[in-house]
Amino acid sequence: MGTTHDHFVVPFVGRTGENGNPRPVAEQLQSVIDHYAQHGWEFYGVEKVGYTINPGCLGALLGNAPTYANIDLVVFRRAR
């Protein structure tokens, strides 16, 4: 049987630079990876997860429907 791992997941929302330059997003992601690597976590990947946002009390009374969004989650692992 293979090695068992613990996993740790953090949300990630990158901010682009001027003119939509994606380079700052890559640098921000690298910073997150480096931070957790210093604490013994191995970068495992980035996953996109969809979720539902239910309307608040007033929105529900007004008949607003739930909205849907996606978030990027950075996944780390380390051997137990």
Image (tube, rainbow, N blue to C red):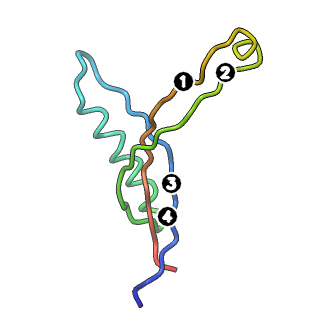
List the residue tagged with mark 4.
39
**Distance of label 4 from label 2 (alpha carbons):** 38 Å
Which callout, 3 or 2, points at the residue further toward the start of the chain?
Answer: 3
**Distance of label 1 from label 3 (alpha carbons):** 23 Å
Amino acid of disc 3:
Val
Circle 3 crowding by C-alpha within 10 Å: few under 14, some 14–19, many from 20: some
Residue at 50 percent across and 28 percent down: it is 68
Quarter of the picture holding the N terminus: bottom left
- Where is residue 28? Give x, y as percent: 36, 39
- Where is residue 23? Give x, y as percent: 23, 33
Circle 4 crowding by C-alpha within 10 Å: few under 14, some 14–19, many from 20: few
Amino acid of disc 2:
Pro
Number of numbered discs on residues: 4
Q: Nearer the viewer, residue 52 or 48?
A: 52
**Distance of label 4 from label 1 (alpha carbons):** 36 Å
**Distance of label 3 from label 2 (alpha carbons):** 26 Å
Residue at 36 percent across and 50 percent down: it is 46
